[in-house]
Amino acid sequence: MLSVKQDLLAALAAELETLSPGAGARAAFENPKVAAHGDFACTAAMQLAKPLKANPRALGEQLKAALEATPAFQQWVDAIEIAGPGFLNIRLKPAAKQQIVREVLAQGAQFGYQPARGEQVLVEFVSANPTGPLHVGHGRQAAIGDAISNLYATQGWKVHREFYYNDAGVQIDTLTKSTQLRAKGFKPGDDCWPTDSENPLAKNFYNGDYIADIAQAFLAKETVKADDREFTANGDVEDYENIRNFAVAYLRNEQDKDLLAFNLKFDEYYLESSLYQNGHVAATVERLIASGYTYEQDGALWLKSTEFGDDKDRVMRKSDGTYTYFLPDVAYHIQKFQRGYGKVVNIQGTDHHGTIARVRAGLQAANVGIPQGYPDYVLHTMVRVVRNGDEVKISKRAGSYVTLRDLIEWTSKDAVRFFLLSRKPDTEYTFDVDLAVAQNNDNPVYYVQYAHARIQSVLRAWQEAGGAGVAALQSVDLSALQGPQAQALMLLLAKYPEMLSAAAAGNAPHDVTFYLRDLASAYHSYYDAERILVDDEAVKLARLALVAATAQVLHNGLAVLGVDAPERM
């Protein structure tokens, strides 16, 4: 049907060009809001009426007659109707809709993919401080970032997944102090371990049980591996630097395990500390000073970020000589651009909203050729977790929050991914653990996966009875696919590539979850309306081809989300 649509668009473009030179380039079909109005809609007559000084309905009648005379419309279109002031409602012949089944079966896992475009995109996500286990908010970010990466891949982009480690700064000192005290035998509640929220010193300590685990491993002189490097503890509780390096490596290793449980791999782990070690932060300061967009006040170095749309100027270097967070962020994004990533997408929590204007201001002030609006941002809210009807707020392991691994262990990797992707990123979300493990139609991931498994069961039954296999279905006669449920299912299959393109353009993986639920619903309706393994061989093969194509698209869509498509349930 995609090839059918292209044929019809080409015919429409030719007729529009005849009516008004240049109009052919704007040839397009819309999806009618009401299915009863047809399969495609065309508003070209209304758009051209004013420049051509013509009555839109009369122009619509003229365009209708011209299109009905073209070979493409004669082959694939059943009827064209004029509606309202000049809408063209186009109804396809069943044979036109049936073409999508062949296209899906022929392209398989590549259905919906666009050709390589020769461009690369860097998607940065999770980027958790190496100070504790990944929490549920990191999980939402992981699901969103990985799905967006997959969406870009379907559109021909070469995708680079990157995790940025804030392994420098105050929070690492807090981790080190906490681990050192645990290694010395102290624990939360001791006099030297303040926990009073009104006591500023309380912020200098982490209370989770995982700190005790790090201290124990340190005293045991263990070796831990974090992605591409290893570090061995020396067990000396007075060696602050050794404790620091070991604690960071230990938690990076723990976060690697969290990501492995989520079936997520990154192409690169980029360390904030490397920006200092390689001189990128110092070079960025020099570049900003040379640009003339800085000034000194009260012993601090400021950036004139208001000249680039920020609501106030920002401190780059504090009076004590240390840098604020946003300066290494600017240096990091200059490196992204200079590494060849003209398109960058950052997935971050909504609490980072204030950093957008200042980072973009710094990049413009640096004057290194970075376009305005670079990078793109997708912001997400945090997640509430409900179990047995009550909100779960803490994890003993983490001390103050529910971890990603908790959620996976309570439910499954697939449920966590699908659920965390089922709403727009910037909307509040409550993760219902009980719903995520329910095996019924109220559980959206179960509903979609069950549709795929149900189809596989039908295909297995056919093959066990002597059927030739899915590959043989590519060439069967599809003319028996005439019923309304079959027609609706085929139309929905045809919308998959268009949905993928729109979801990628809008950084909107939730659109994929909506589509898959609609597709599963359409399949279940079809299954309930028409038996598939009937005695009539031609009818049976046509229906098998349709459900096999549906299974393929369900599989493809779930793969974009990082969710499995089970053969059995």
Image (cartoon, helix red, strand yellow):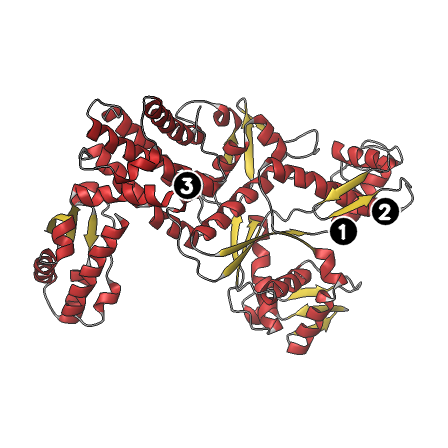
Q: Amino acid at mark 3?
A: Gly
Residue drawn at (50%, 38%), measured in percent from left and top? 420
Pick whichever of labels 1 and 3 is earlier in the sequence: 1
Q: Which residue is mark 3?
A: 557
| Number of other residues with Cα within 10 Å of mark 3, as a class: few under 14, some 14 to 19, many 20 or more | many
Residue drawn at (73%, 51%), measured in percent from left and top? 167
Instruction: Specify the label residue 252 is tagged with.
Output: none
Q: Amino acid at mark 2?
A: Asn
If the image is split into quadrants, where does the C terminus sit?
A: top left
- Residue 132 visible in rendering: no
Pick whichever of labels 1 and 2 is earlier in the sequence: 1
In percent of width and height, residue 350 lies at 55, 49
Question: Are the residues flagged by discs 1 and 3 in contact, CB closer than 8 Å?
Answer: no
| Number of other residues with Cα within 10 Å of mark 1, as a class: few under 14, some 14 to 19, many 20 or more | few
Q: Which residue is mark 1?
A: 170
Q: CA distance from mark 1 to mark 3?
A: 42 Å
Task: Name the mark nearer the viewer: 1 or 2.
Answer: 2
In the image shown, does 280 or 182 lie closer to the viewer?
280
